[in-house]
Amino acid sequence: MRVSYEWLQSFFEEPLPPPADVAHALTFGAFEIEGMEQKGDDTVFDIKVLPDRACYALSHRGIALEVAALCGKKVTYDPLRKERPALTPRASQQLSVSVEDTMRCPFYALARLEQIHVGPSPAWLVRRLEAIGQRSINTIVDATNYVMFELGTPLHAFDAKKVQGAITVRQAREGETITLLGGAECTLPAYATVIAEATYDTAIAVAGVKGGATAELTANTHSVLVEAATFDPVITRKVSQALGLRTDAAKRYESSVDEELPAYGLARVVELILEIAGGRLVGFASTELAHRARYKLGVSARDANHLLGTALTDDSLREIFVRMNVPYEEVRDPLKKVLELAPSFVGAPYKLGEKMMRSAPHTFECSTFTAYLFAQAGFSIPRVSVDQCLWGDKVVLESLEPGYLVFSNSGEGKIWNESCYFLPGKKVPEGIDHVGLYLGDGKVIHAARGPGKVVIEDLKESPGFKKVVAACRVFDKNDVRFVVDVPPERSDLRLIQDLIEEVGRVYGYERVTPQQLPPLAKKPEINQRHALTEEIRAILHESGCTEIFTYSLRGHGETMLLNALAADKNHLRATLTEAMQEELIKNERNAPLLSTGREIRLFEIGDVFPVSGEELHVAVGVRDFGKKRVAQEKEILDKVSAHMQEKYGVAPVITDSVCEWNLGGAVAQRTATAYPTLPVVATSAYYRPFSVYPFVLRDIALWAPVALDAERIQKIISEKGGPLLVRIDKFDEFSKEGRTSYAFHLVFQASDRTLSDTEVTALMDGVTGALFAQGGEPR
Amino acid sequence: MTQYIHPLTGAIREIAGIFSRMGFSIADGPELEDPWYNFDALNVPKDHPSRDMQDTFWLPDGRVMRTHTSPVQIRWMQAHPIEQGPIRMVVTGKCYRNEATDMTHEAQFYQVEGLVIDTDITLAHLKGTVTAFFSEFFGGTVEVRLRPSFFPFTEPSVEVDMRLTGESAPPKLRDRWIEVMGAGMVHPRVLAHAGIDPKRYQGFAFGGGIERLCMLKWGIDDVRLFHTGDLRFIQQFPAQTL
């Protein structure tokens, strides 16, 4: 996301550190900075906001809070930390909204404004939008965009005159079409959510994605409806993908815009419209926001240190949470807090099957009661009784202490014999359907089905605890806990690990001291596949073969990909042989450039994918250029085959100059107890790019006197050949009557062009001239 | 006769050696993978933006070409119950991403991935382990720094940067911070999916591209060279005499 430094400054009264320092702080404390650009007096950061933080950080406000925490500055303008705007006055009856399915749209609100002026935006607004790469359109559209980039809540404006009747949020009709802003017509997927006007039942927007052309604003628009809402992330994402509309709104909705946020966005945009476009607010219409308890997340210094390997204290945690500007409570005695809080809910109604966040503390069932109590003290325990039992440390029933959880198999509810969410598959043979909190003195408090409310009873007498099957301790260290009231926009904070990450990055990962792993009692296991492939590499290296790696994706095979990159890469290879043959031919062309010269011996080890399934194969390919080519190739392959047969009992599939073995069976039978010791790459090795231009091969043959030996000849050739002479290979030498005959291959190649014949001939003339001057004679 | 070692094999051999000496077992797993192992078990739910982070090749039967070596974490944890001892494993293997190729991107590449689980494994151990690995792999003095990041399968998640200092460091790498891998503390849901109690056990995981390590170590400028089979490339890597 593009973020303006000047815009960020607007959240602070005190001056921010220079842009480079802000970028540095963000890089090591929060986000990768993909770019920084000077725009007039402003600096624009390109910040990579990853999916976890998209819920709050796709906004200048979100980034400002990060800057505050990481640079130690105080945010002075933060609408989201104020009380949620009440959206009053209510608009008249003409403006009504209804939502068909609150799962699709948990909250929907409209503001109606009249006598507004749709025209050019003020310079400051245009500047800020343009800084982050947005085009200014008009006062109203700019205001909605501005607030989205300021607070992260998408907004949309309709021309009120073009909307007939009530607004309904509903699922798209089969084959429903809409003309979008910009004129494109599209057919909506049946799972899409649309905003429709009730009179003609026409879609006027694709919910959370893009507005329709029907109610587009024009210069003649004088009254508008501004929408702020929350839409289901998954549906929004699927629709936006299906329609190919990856809009700024969709990006925010798919990362979850909390249901409490639209009210802030709507109040803010109304304020801004009245400021820059005049007019008056008629009023708001909205759906009801369902009750929800605040998420509580607690951490102690011990917890944080246990995950991070740090030495944080309560003081360091306190400082970090203050810097983060999140509401938190320090619970000095969590056990006491749980025990004191519990009796205050006596009489609260029992209601089964509700979501804890939606029902507590108004109604409870047994496990939401205990989970809620511990959450207030900063312990996030699982929601379901059977999972609470697995989560805690088991204690014997005889040594119950206040604050322990007691579990029973009361037969009144569904008996759980297996973990529900916490440890999928984990069995609990005793079966659990009920939980309560032990208060001491034989008393238990629980949300009880029978009486239909939270009650304190004698554990021995309670019908819910006729058959107590287990008890556990939720925590063993009664440390000070920092219990954060998770702000609504921080839907990324749900687990203690999430909170510890916040602690760690604000504290600074550079302060984590590297530590070595402790020694292990057990020796590492030997991987038979690795051991076998290493052994085979040793054998093949011994036979003069060089290992290659080729592409697994090819133009044909037995298994096809659904979404290939290209037609020549749309299958998985079924053999290694095909690629091996291609590589032999390709390398043969370059043979004069290779140090292996006259013969090319290759092997590849890798997985192939015949219809029968994935298999580990090895292939060996041999190319020889001598007169006895076929015989020599056969000799090498026969030797390797015999070795493979003898050692691993595998026979090859032979195709021309290539043998291929399936190693699956060999791996399964191996019982190696160590890995072979094989060479690594020489420490002196360092890659030098090679030319992609054609090389020119010339031969030279001469009679040389004794004084002109091979070494001298090579030196002269090399000198006269110059930098374009990339390789000299002596391929013949014999002596007769006091003279020796030599023959060399000379390979010329340029790194930047194709060499011309005249160029090479001139160099060759220089070479032969110099050699003849030293007593050489042509042969 | 000179032996040549393909840089991928050379790097994998060194990686396996270094981690074996640190007590890591070597693991492997299929390249053609069940999406549950590749995504769901790793806390990458369907229809979640985090799935966009890895462009995937799909097969008509619903399987995927693994986009990372992380599914091997799950397979290893399932096969090695934590009650029988701490987990310390490393895997090197081929992975696939459905993305256009250029000098730094390939649709197929090798990853190295490590996993350490016990009762008291911390982020400090992660830092210590990767520092030890890079020091030995690149030779010389290595500093490691962590930057916050996001991977669905770790929490907290970090990017790992390293800096080589001292005379023995290759001149092109000396005194430069280089991004080398992603890492983090294993997400509790990943542990739970693999049958490990996340309240009692914790640990770290890390993963990175092996081609990238090779490119840094040997100054290779184009990732596509690794899978060409071209001896003009491979013959630049002679074997160290034992």
Image (cartoon, helix red, strand yellow):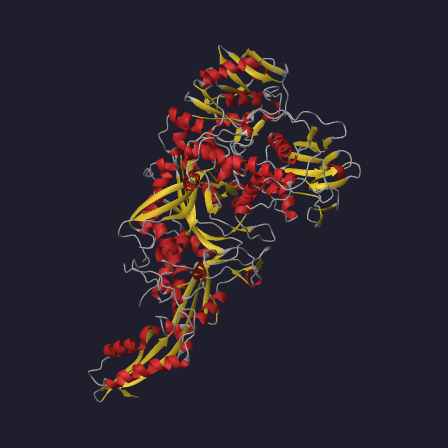
Residue B193 visible somewhere in the drawing: no
Q: Is residue A685 left or right of residue A212?
A: left
Residue A495 location in percent, x, y? Answer: 50, 31
Residue A50 location in percent, x, y? Answer: 51, 42
Name of the residue lying farthest toward the right: A199
Q: Is residue A644 left or right of residue A465?
A: left
Which quadrant would the C terminus of chain A be assigned to in this image?
bottom left
Residue A193 location in percent, x, y? Answer: 69, 39
Report which quarter residue A220 is drawn in: top right
Name of the residue lying farthest toward the left: A707
The answer to whether residue B183 is above or below residue A752 is above
Residue A256 location in percent, x, y? Answer: 58, 36
Of residues B186 and A513, the one nearer the viewer is A513
The answer to whether residue B225 is above or below residue A98 is below
The residue drawn where x is 37% and y is 33% is A309
Q: Is residue B212 left or right of residue A241?
A: left
The answer to whether residue A166 is above or below residue A251 is above
